[in-house]
Amino acid sequence: MLFLQYLISGIMTGGIYGLIGVGIVIIYKATQVFNFAVGTLMTLGALICVSLVTNFNFPFWLALPATLVLAGIIGVLIERIGLRPLLSQPVLSIIMATLAIESILRGLMLMIWTGYTISFPRGLFPGKTIFIGPLFISHEFLIAFVVAMISFALVGLFFYKTQTGLKMRVTAESHDVAMSLGVNITTIFAVAWALAVMVGTLSGVIIGNRLGLQVIITSAVAYKALPAIMLGGLDSVAGAIIGGLIVGVLEKMAGGYIDPKIAEITPYIILLLILMIRPEGIFGLKRIERI
Amino acid sequence: MWRPSGAIDDTYKKDMAIVRTKTHWSWLVVGLILLYLVPFFVSAVALNTVNYIAITIIALHGVNILTGMTGLITLGHASFIAVGAYLMTLMVVHLNINFWLAAPIAVLLTGLVGVIVGLPSLRIKGFYLAMATLAAQFIIPWLIVNVRSDLTGGTDGLNVPPPSIGGFLLTSQTSLFYLCMTMAVLVTFFTANLKRSRFGRAFISIRDNDLAAEIMGIAIVRYKLLSFFLCSAYAGLAGVLYAVWMRGISPEHFDLTESVWYLGMLIVGGMGSGIGVVFGAIIIRGLNIVVLYVAPLVGGFFSAATATAIELGFGPLVFGLVVMGFLIYEPRGLAMIWERFKAFYRLWPFSY
């Protein structure tokens, strides 16, 4: 019974890891940029949402779409100002650029929202706990999980059913091929960043609603999404979700059966193991290198 | 790099020398003498910063070997520094080993830890490797805090007893200056020499294209692991000195942000360049001090609560902007600007 409880809470947490991971995968697929700034972007979106609700008295149903639009604009701006000039630079420059963006955003957020914990107002979601026999699921987690799953579905539909989604998949395959087929890849880059920051914002709102928002602590949650996407495969949206769920469950299991303290680093141990055994992940594409 | 025409080597010995011309020699001697006279001119507070910069230079040379020369990205450098600092302190405090014996052992052991962390590099590279070192950055501090926290002091950390030479305790900033700066000079010299040796050339060829390097007969397994060993041994030395300089260590001194800062310094200074390492360390650590004084001035225009927030966020903001600026406008860093300045100085008043 304890096993089932760990499984359920693991899946719930894993859903959030997966959602954060999707934000990274979208950008990586389209632009070959690994976005380390995803944690701060996520926190930034959530903090904007909180401010809209508390300081500007927006109702939540209006604040969330407004935040998502803003998030999209932020994503496009970051791509245009920060990463476009670094097109086709070495990996280290790209990694360092996203880390520098992270640092800039962290500084700005600390200035605007201070270092204290900020909470969403109570009662945005009905805060009950559902009991199924001896198992219990927090209502907030359930909503978070459902929202995460709906977002996955929407992202999937976008990728496989729309024209832009098709263009993004071509761009992911090869920039040269995409360009020769008449795809404007700079537009696709902008769309990818906008979409990724929106997804990140959504996960930030979900996390913030459950745990409150603190610039540094909330951003650090996103690092646990890295093992999830490495496990699933860096260029697979479905892989990110499944990886997220596996990492979430294993984290809860390790915390429950071995030692609560070890839960903290379980994702990173998984990460090391994947990198040593199967670096391309479960669903990832293995790239063959030529000189 | 290149010397003006007319400065010709007539023996192999001269051709191989690291300090090549009389001008070089005079600059070197005058520079070293001035460097060692610094404690007589600056205050103890400023000397404190100088020591910190010297320690940073040592650690940054390690990042330079691994990331700048070999092209293996590390996001876990701060955790290597933590290993060195903790190993030395644990040996001195719990095993009563003399500092001067414990320090080299700690440095070597840190190197071995680096080799273990570097094992994934045999299969993966690029940001996959960055990810593996990132995992180390999270796992190592966790191990320090949670495994035998009775020895390591857990999150509280440890106090470090000052080392002594024949009864003379190295506690003043001046005495620490001579220890740290001598080490920094030696490490800089060693790295400069390493870069032009067989090892350095192997590292650089692995950076440029590891498959091609392997085909040309370079044992990339050995050299990648050697690179990790050197990187973390340098980090271990920096950690030992950091512990002595700080007189106390705790896991939060060695977090991910610190690792990112080291990479940022490398970008600002210029990858793979010895002089760039020195510049990068001075600029970023110096900026940190400047921010410390400027942020309250900026915050003074606002209310007290906003002022605290601004002081908190100013450092990361400035660091991010500086690194981003260098990435976009001068990806080869201050070292390149220095090279251009030297060329300009040598040719002035002609343009070429």
Image (cartoon, helix red, strand yellow):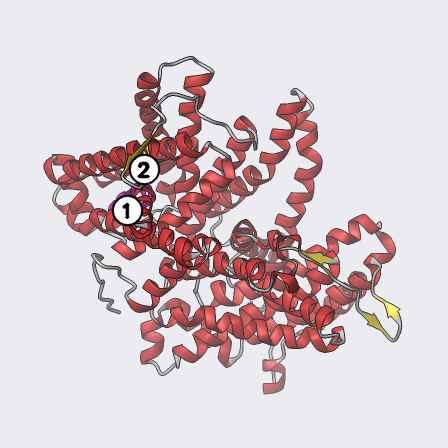
| Residue B171 at x, y percent in the picture | 83, 61
**Apparent side of residue A103 relative to residue A126 in the rendered image (left or right):** right
Camera-side residue: A179 or A248?
A248
User: Compared to B297, does A28 lie above or below?
Assistant: below
Kind of residue sitting beneath label 2? Ile
- The chain identifier of the residue carrying mark 2 reads A
Q: Which residue is mark 1?
A: A25
| Residue B82 in view here | yes
Residues beneath discs 2 and 1 located on the same chain = yes
Q: Which residues are magenta?
A: A14-31
Instruction: Report the disc number at residue B246.
Output: none
Give coordinates of residue B34: x percent, y percent: 80, 61
The disc placed on residue A137 is 2
Q: Amino acid at mark 1?
A: Val
- Crowd rating for badge 1 (residues with CA inside 10 Å; few <14, some 14–19, many 20+): many
Q: Is residue A182 above or below residue B263?
A: above
Q: Is residue B316 above or below residue A291?
A: above
In-front residue for pair A220/B221:
A220
Q: Residues within 10 Å of mark 2 (few under 14, many from 20)?
A: some
| Labels 2 and 1: the sequence-earlier one | 1
In which quarter of the view is residue B188 placed? bottom right
Name the secondary structure under disc 2: strand
